[in-house]
């Protein structure tokens, strides 16, 4: 009889320990699921939008530099064919498309934000983007007008610094 009571008591104690352990495991699983849900619903879309914004800014940079190199080669060869004008206008339209896409992504990014801390970052990104696009337009305009030398190098350096500042703000 004593063995039967001891065996029953051990089974009851093991069942209680198993129930407590199961409760703790289920609670931790739900906690992890909740945190992952926050990550999945908020953080990952934000990071994806920032990555896409950086890509569009890179495309603006590349297209702007492509246009200046294209115009430089066009001026040096003094080729006045309509094919070059078409290529030049295609590059300019590509720059504008990338700017529009960046703006759309930026608006989507702003909609995903709810923290006031991040709103300051949004404002800074917007300012850096405006500086970047102004300098991109100026860079293209200088090349169209045939401006070269110190003025052109200054705007080129300003454009490069503006790109670095924008990317740093997006990455922060």
Image: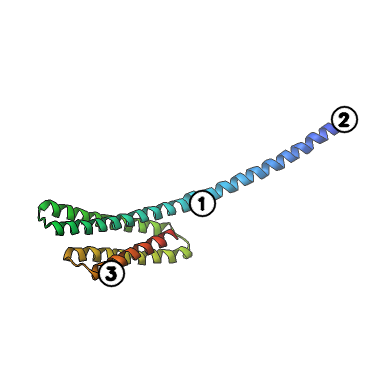
Give residue 1's position: percent from left, percent from top: 89, 29
Say whether marks 2 and 1 touch (CB < 8 Å).
Answer: no
- In the image, residue 155 above or below residue 104: below
Residue 152 lies, with reference to residue 37, above or below; the image says below
Tag of residue 126: none
**What residue is rendered at 87% in x and 30% in y?**
3
Asked if labels 1 and 3 touch by Cβ distance under 8 angstroms, the answer is no
- Direction from residue 39 to residue 99 in the image, left or right: left
Disc 2/disc 1 C-alpha distance (Å): 52 Å
Q: Classify residue 99 as left or right of residue 122.
A: left
Q: Residue furthest right?
A: 2
Q: Residues within 10 Å of mark 3 (few under 14, many from 20)?
A: few
Q: Is the residue 166 above or below the residue 4 in the image?
A: below
Say few, some or many: other residues with alpha carbon within 10 Å of mark 2 (under 14 / 14 to 19 / 20 or more): few
Residue assigned mark 3: 154
Side (left or right) of 14 relative to 51: right
Could you tell me residue 96's position as x and y percent?
Answer: 25, 57
Find disc 2 in the rendering and name its residue.
3
Q: Quadrant of residue 65?
A: bottom left
Query: Secondary structure beneath disc 2?
Result: helix
Name the spot of residue 106 as percent of width and height, x first: 36, 58
Task: Give percent across and percent down for residue 132.
Answer: 31, 64
Q: Secondary structure at mark 1?
A: helix
Q: In front: 43, or 87?
A: 87
* Pair 2/3: label in front: 3
Please tell me which of labels 3 and 1 falls first in the chain.
1
Q: CA distance from mark 3 to mark 1?
A: 46 Å
Say which of 159 and 11 sits in front: 159
At horizontal 37% and vertical 53% (from top left) the residue drawn is 52
Q: Earlier in the sequence, mark 2 or mark 3?
A: 2
Whichever of labels 2 and 1 marks the residue nearer the N terminus, that label is 2
């Amino acid at each position: 009889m004593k063995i039967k009571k001891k065996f029953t008591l051990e089974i009851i104690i093991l069942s209680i320990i198993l129930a407590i352990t199961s409760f703790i495991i289920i609670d931790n699983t739900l906690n992890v699921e909740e945190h992952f849900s926050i990550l999945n619903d908020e953080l990952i879309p934000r990071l994806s939008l920032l990555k896409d914004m950086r890509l569009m800014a890179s495309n603006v940079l590349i297209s702007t530099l492509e246009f200046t190199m294209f115009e430089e080669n066009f001026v040096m060869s003094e080729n006045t064919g309509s094919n070059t004008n078409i290529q030049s206008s295609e590059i300019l339209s590509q720059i504008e498309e990338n700017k529009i896409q960046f703006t759309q992504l930026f608006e989507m990014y702003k909609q995903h934000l709810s923290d006031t801390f991040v709103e300051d970052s949004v404002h800074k990104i917007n300012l850096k983007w405006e500086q970047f696009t102004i300098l991109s337009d100026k860079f293209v305009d200088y090349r169209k007008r045939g401006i070269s030398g110190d003025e052109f190098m200054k705007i080129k350096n300003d454009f490069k610094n503006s790109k670095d500042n924008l990317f740093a703000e997006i990455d922060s």
